[in-house]
Image: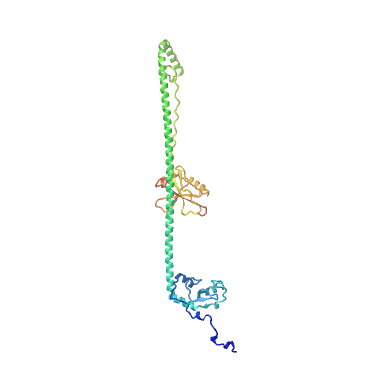
Amino acid sequence: MPSPSKRPRSSVRAPYASTCTQPMLQSDEVTALAIDTLNLDLQCPICMNIIREPMATECLHRFCNNCIEKSLRFGKKECPSCRAYVATRRNLRRDENFARLIDSLYPDLDAFEEEEEQVMVETNATHTLAHQEKMGVEWQRRMDHMRAERARELAAERGRKRAREEAAREARAAREAREAEDDDDDEEGEGDSSDEEGSEGEEGSEEEDDEGEEGEEGEEGEEEGEGEDGGATPAPSDAGGKTRPSPPPRARKKLVPQVQEYGFFLSRHPLEARVAPLPKAFVTVSGAAQVRHLQKYLALKLKAGPWERFVLSVQKPGEPTTTPLPAETTLQAVVDAHAVEANSLELFFRFRILGYD
């Protein structure tokens, strides 16, 4: 019996011989791959560039020769991809097949990397320009919203001012009408009293004829009485000899000076970051008030104190910086010195910290 080692080869059947002899590709179809997808498989996990001089670890991860040597020399003794232990660089081997694949895909690798860097620079510039345009549009939108809000506040304040002026005019007209009615009543009362005096005068003229004889004696008595009284002025009397009471003096109205009110925009200074801006920037204040009243208003609304640390300043037309306002300055003087249009003056506030400002 022949030994198994000397069995003829024809007796050993290969069950997959027929399938192995057939070609794996049955057609001439070409599969296209995106360059980005291909680059992800050819990148070094350390430097994120196309692998140069590919070196493979025992865990079959590929890196650039310089990258993996630096990683093992200055870092941990492990694979940067899977953290498998790598004792020394002797555990690395050069992958020639992978190197030939890269050479066939990128004959000039330096030119490809320069092109990629240029594309990245242009992309970053485009993104930066788009971001700047977006920020500019957003800034313009915020400024338009702020201007519209200020315009609405100014229009509302003007409406309230017109309503106050209209109410004051109506009250003044009503008061003048009442005073005119009182004057008419006084004139009617004087007319009635003059009619009564006329009727009494007629009765007195009839009595004068009966008292003719007593006239001379009465005159002498009056002369003696005047001498005794020292020339005192008698009270006014009517034709019948009755004294008439003098009307009470009319009280004069006190004229109250009208104080004009002004509107201001209290905005946070561009360099101020310690306190928050006011929820409502537009305020209406009397012209007789002083700057320190606005400082106290800011300390109360922003809950930061003391009020002396708030500094109010105004920007003059044509100047890039602001000018601080003294605390004792009246708002009327500020408006006269700096306002270009009524109710449109903008004041900037800052919170000063001792030892820092």
Position in image of residue 89 (x %, y %): 54, 77
* Residue drawn at 42 percent across, 23 percent down: 190
Quarter residue 175 falls in: top left
Position in image of residue 5 (x %, y %): 58, 87
- Render colour scheme: rainbow
Seen as rendered, the residue at the extreme bottom is 1
Position in image of residue 142 (x %, y %): 44, 53
Between 279 and 13, the residue placed more toward the observer is 13
Quarter residue 78 falls in: bottom right
User: Count the marks: how many?
Assistant: 0
Residue 332 visible in this rendered orientation of the protein: no
Between 180 and 115, the residue placed more toward the observer is 115
What is the quadrant of the N terminus in the image?
bottom right
Please, is residue 58 above or below residue 317 in the view? below
Please, is residue 170 above or below residue 50 in the view? above
* Residue drawn at 43 percent across, 48 percent down: 150
Position in image of residue 27 (x %, y %): 44, 76
* Residue drawn at 42 percent across, 31 percent down: 177
Residue 188 visible in this rendered orientation of the protein: yes
Between 139 and 242, the residue placed more toward the observer is 139
